[in-house]
Image: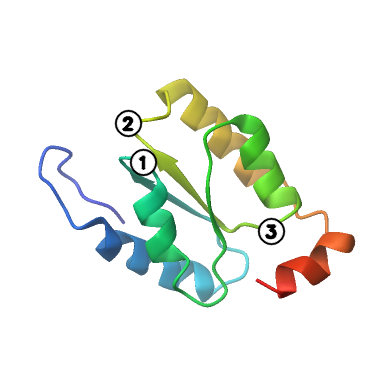
Amino acid sequence: MGTDDSKTSVNYPDYAHKLSKKVSNNSKNIGILVCGSGMGMSMAANKHKKIRAAVCYSVKNAKLSRLHNNANIITLGSRLTKKNIAFKCIEVFVSTKFEGGRHKKRVKKI
């Protein structure tokens, strides 16, 4: 869904909104967003109902964002996260399921 040209500057919120709409329309969808720090994408995505976008910078952080927060979008910072770590974060994020239990009532408050 993103840009096809990695050299041309784009308005990242446009892509965050586009992806967030797709994810919010289907509870089984998971999204991946990348910008320089991951923060801008996260802020834009979290404006949408049913979206819980988490900035992830480590495998543990990615796992906990799914286990405890039921995050449905992972955002990564291309300037701050090494490529191999980013791919490991995505792998863990996609394969980890929400733990539920005591976390369910907390997620409802978000």
Q: Which mark is residue 97?
A: none
In this rendering, would 8 be left or right of 11?
A: left
Pointer 1 residue: 37
Whether tag 1 and tag 2 are in contact, CB under 8 A, the answer is yes
| Element type at mark 2 | loop
Q: Nearer the viewer, mark 1 or mark 3?
A: 1
In the image, residue 79 sits, relative to residue 84, either above or below, namely: below
In this rendering, the answer to whether 36 lies above or below 39 is above
Label 3: few (<14), some (14–19) or many (≥20) C-alpha neighbours in 10 Å: many
9 displayed left or right of 21: left
Q: Earlier in the sequence, mark 1 or mark 2?
A: 1
Amino acid beneath label 2: Arg
For disc 1, the neighbor class at 10 Å (few under 14, some 14 to 19, many from 20) is some
Question: Looking at the picture, how far across and down is residue 41, in whole percent?
Answer: 37, 55
Q: Which residue is mark 2?
A: 79
**Residue tagged by mark 3?**
70
Dot 3 lies on which element? Answer: loop
**Secondary structure at numbered mark 1:** loop
Nearer the observer: mark 3 or 2; the answer is 2
Q: Amino acid at mark 1?
A: Ser
Q: Residue shown at 57%/63% (left/top)?
A: 52
Looking at the image, is mark 1 or mark 3 earlier in the sequence? Answer: 1
Residue 50: x, y in percent?
57, 74
In the drawing, does residue 42 fall left or right of residue 97?
left
Left or right: residue 25 versus residue 70 is left
Q: Residue at x 81, y 67 (%)?
A: 104
Q: Position of residue 46 (x, y in %)?
A: 48, 66
Q: Amino acid at mark 3?
A: Asn
The Cα atoms of the two marked residues, 1 and 2, are separated by 6 Å
